[in-house]
């Protein structure tokens, strides 16, 4: 039987860490990223700290805003 819910804590934390690193490398504040993605500032912080996961749609939006390939968040 397939799991009805799956949460990969390690992957969520790794994604958040990579998002933060790319955002800082690009010189973009959390506030600017929140504004560009229409997410609440606190949600950006929770994603970057690996407290919550995000949808694949937001992965693509982060990539668009930060001018990177979506796969860059998973390297």
Image (spheres, rainbow, N blue to C red):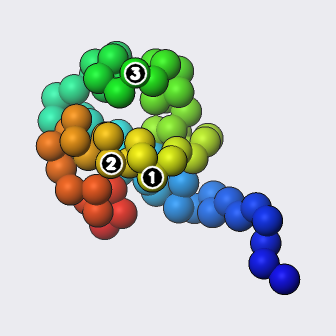
Q: Earlier in the sequence, mark 3 or mark 1?
A: 3
Which residue is farthest bottom?
A: 1
Vertical side of 60 occupied by 11: above or below: below
The quadrant where residue 3 appears:
bottom right
Vertical side of 50 occupied by 7: above or below: below
Disc 3 designates what residue?
A: 38
Q: In this rendering, does residue 17 appear at all? A: no
Give the number of the disc on residue 60: 2
Task: Give the CA separation, mark 1 to mark 2.
Answer: 6 Å
Q: Are marks 3 and 1 in contact (CB under 8 Å)?
A: no
Disc 1 designates what residue?
A: 56
Which quadrant is home to the C terminus?
A: bottom left
Q: Position of residue 11 (x, y in %)?
A: 53, 61
Residue at 79% x, 65% y is 4
Disc 2 secondary structure class: helix
In front of the other: 16 or 4:
4
Other residues around mark 2 within 10 Å, as few (<14) / some (14–19) / many (≥20)? some
Task: Give the CA separation, mark 2 to mark 3.
Answer: 14 Å
Q: Position of residue 61 (x, y in %)?
A: 32, 40
The quadrant where residue 46 appears:
top right
Disc 3 secondary structure class: loop
Q: Are marks 2 and 3 in contact (CB under 8 Å)?
A: no
């Amino acid at each position: 039987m397939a799991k009805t819910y799956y949460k990969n804590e390690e992957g969520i934390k790794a994604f958040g860490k990579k998002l933060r690193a790319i955002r800082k490398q690009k010189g973009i504040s959390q506030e600017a990223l929140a504004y560009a993605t229409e997410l609440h500032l606190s949600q950006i912080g929770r994603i970057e700290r690996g407290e919550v996961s995000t949808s694949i749609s937001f992965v693509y939006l982060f990539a668009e805003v930060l001018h990177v390939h979506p796969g860059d968040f998973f390297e």
